[in-house]
Amino acid sequence: MELLWLLVLGLAITVFFQHRRLKRIEARLDGLNRPATSPAEKAEPPLPVQAPPPILPHEGGGDAPPKPAIPHDSDSSSPPPPPVGEGWGGGPPAQQLPPPKGPTLADRFTLWLRDNWILAIAAASLALAGVFFVQYGVERGLLPPPVRVLAALAFGLGLVFTGERLRLRHGDHAGLWHSIPSTLSAAGIVSLFAAILAARHLYGLIGPLPTFAGLTATAVLALILGWRHTPLLGAAGLIGATAAPFLVGGSADNSDPLYAYFALIAATGLAVDSLRRWAWMSVLALALATVAGLALQTAGAGGTGLALLLITLTALAAAIPERGILLRTQGPGLVASGQSRKNPPFPVLLALGMGIVTALTLAALPAPDAGTDMALFTLLALAVPVFALWTYRAPGLVELALPFALAFVARLGISPDNSLGLHAALWPVLDARAQDGAVALPLTYALPFIGTALIALGLWITGRRKGALSHSALSSLLPPLALALIGQHWWPDTLLGQPLWAGILLGFAAFHTLQASDAASDAEPRRRMAWAAVAALVLIAYAAAVLFSETALTLALAALLAATAAIDRRFRLPELGWLVQAGVVVLGLRLTFDPGLFWAYDAPLAQLLLAWGGALAGAGAALYLIAAMDRPAPRLMLETFLAASTAILADVLIFRWLDSLALPDEGIHWGLTLLSLPWIVIMAVQFRRATLPGPMAVVRRLLGWVAGLIGLAGLLLAVTLANPLVWGEWVGRWPLFNTLIVAYGLPGLALFLLSRPGWMPRRLAFVLRWFGLFLMAHWSLLEIRRFWHGPYIPLPFVEQAELYSYTLWLMALGAGLLWLSIRRGSAAYRKVAMGVIGLTIAKVFLLDASGLTGLTRVAAFLGLGLSLVGLALLNRWAAERSGKGGGGEGRQDLPRDEV
């Protein structure tokens, strides 16, 4: 079965490369048939006719001299190999027309198969002849096993010798003998592989080491033959040499040396490509070595050896195409090519592609022990500055260090999930520290910090290049991200102590400050300086969060917010505006959630005023500093933060004041309202900030709806179940200045003022406006009841004078709404006013008529009649004003009020 698969693979390679040969021939024929000049070229001076260079120079003859008898052999007309750095770009040379669009791949394969099917069958037949010769000997028992193997080897060598003789005599690329020498040599190589494998697996004549040596020698022979005249045998040699260790069988105690063997094979394939310009040879060599290394590691070899193999392959992919240690690879990198829409040259794609594969593999490679994990961290950390320095003068490979930095940061977050890795060695120390035990930290714990420092240094070197600004952004982003992952998963505050951990963070902040100073000489817009300054400020804030208490941290963040605005005003760095917005969000979260309002309700008053006052002062200073700058988003964030924080602080102070009084009851009605108002403020702030463009607008609207639902639900509870009319709580002895205005009057006024359509959706503004009016009306009714009943106002007892007071209040409310409808030209207010008047009439006839007696009843109906006459006249006047035609003022205001 192994022989059959080997044969199928050889036939597939044969078909592929014969197709490539046909493609080259068609390209040459198209070049010969093309007119010397095109109509567009008639106005230009004529250029000498030049045939397009062959795709594979020196493909046919290699070092052998061309034969005079074959004038059309490609060996005699091929130009010398292009200089280093050329030939892989994929585009035509300068001053040449692009090749015409030829037939499709399927058409070319069909054409080749139609003309050369005999050669394909001949190659398969010759290869099968060698295989079946061995099989026949087994079935018949005619020859002893050693003789059968030797005969198969002689048959294969004979085919190779015959193919070489024919190639030297007649060539391999034109004429009557076209492709026949390559066919014979390929069949001979397959026969040699089959004979060696038969000696090992069928007869057991040789052990693993001789089998390995024989397969390797056959692969080397194929590489030499392919180097001389055809890529077909070169590919067969690479595949055979890579598959040899897996085909010999046997076992070994230590298979790690095979990693070096695979690296040598890859170097050989890259060297062939460097001389012959067969780009696919480099890709095939790197792919085979990578797959073989992964298979070897899966079979039980060490992960450290695989990491060394992959990094070595990356270095070889960068160096061998340049034919030197000092890299000078030209051309745009991946980021620059994406911006300029220009394809990078093949050496750049080869090296960066191998680097990305290596980084992804090392980031996700499992570590069965702490040693392997430590080796992976070390190799990734060292690779960043080494590749950054090595590629410093190679513009095309400036990005080669970036994948390894990303892999290191990713591994910082992945490694803690691996219970057998380096992270597991810290668990006993953490357990001992939890039990007040004195256990020293292992030295390996310094590896994440040293590695972060190394990647910061390497990224700084990469970011100083005059390349894409994204490199500088990563040099400022990845080190703080790595430190954040260390703080989240590696317990530095517990194992190192908060002062030492904060000192490390400040040390990295100093490094980014130095980086910002180095970038200060850049031309506008000085983005490198901005990103480095942002990284330094973020790390300073992180150190403050580690080191300071709740109040001190809030003050430090407020000072940092003001300092960020000052730096932005001094240097005009737009990225600092983003940091101002982030600082506003962080301060808002600290004041409302962590430590939040519950801390504010219970903390000492001095600490509360210091924390909230410092936050407001820092935000106010930042707003003052950027007021004259073109920073609409930071200004809006600061304005809403100041307004919301002031309102919430007033709410908290009122709550604390009422809670400190020796009230007879718990105060559920005003407590629910004061707890709900911050959510209403947060809702208004989020909807106001949602007016800013960007992807966060949807998130802010969602947060606004959630906060609004929570706040409105609390207010509804305060009006219904927690209402003093139902609960019977103490409301205060003083008129107006009591718990009712805190629970209903001021919240209703706040909702009415917040219901501006520019701040929130129109329907929500409509709900808030009328709910606010309802709360104020409810407060005034409860104040009337408190006036007649004192501090306790539970239902159901109602006095006669109280009923008349309600009637007068309703009439006044209707008149006020009618006046408001006239002032604003709103038909909606007039309709509500008439509804209130109708409710007043119903109250008088249904309630007052049965509850009032004597002169009180007379006064009630007399006042009602006179009031209704006046209100009827007022309503008619309001209807006439609101019904005016043309562009009256009332008509213009109507859509705004009928939200």
Image: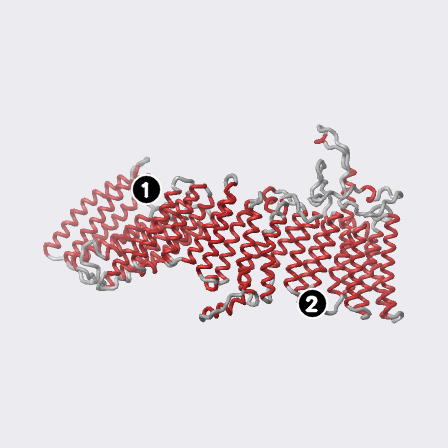
Name the residue tied to disc 1: 894
Residue lying at 80% horizontally and 54% vertically, measured from the top left: 224
- Identify the element where label 1 is drawn: helix
3D distance between C-alphas at marks 1 and 2: 88 Å
Residue lying at 58% horizontally and 48% vertically, measured from the top left: 462
Instruction: Give the image location of residue 741, x and y in percent.
Output: 24, 54
- Amino acid type of the residue tagged 1 in the rendering: Leu
- Identify the element where label 2 is drawn: loop
Q: In which quadrant of the rendered view does residue 671 lie? A: bottom left
- Position of residue 222 in the picture relative to residue 654 (left or right): right
Instruction: Give the image location of residue 38, x and y in percent.
Output: 73, 33
Residue 147 is tagged as none
Instruction: Give the image location of residue 767, x and y in percent.
Output: 33, 51
- Position of residue 192 in the picture relative to residue 671 (left or right): right
Q: Which callout, 1 or 2, points to the residue nearer the camera?
A: 2
Residue 254 is tagged as 2
Count the marks: how many? Answer: 2
Instruction: Give the image location of residue 537, x and y in percent.
Output: 45, 50
**Badge 1 or badge 2: first in the primary sequence:** 2
Residue that protrudes farthest toward the left in the picture? 855
- Position of residue 800 in the picture relative to residue 484 (left or right): left
Q: Is residue 709 visible?
A: no
Residue lying at 65% horizontally and 47% vertically, measured from the top left: 348
Nearer-the-camera pick, 170 or 574: 574
Quadrant where the image shows the N terminus: bottom right
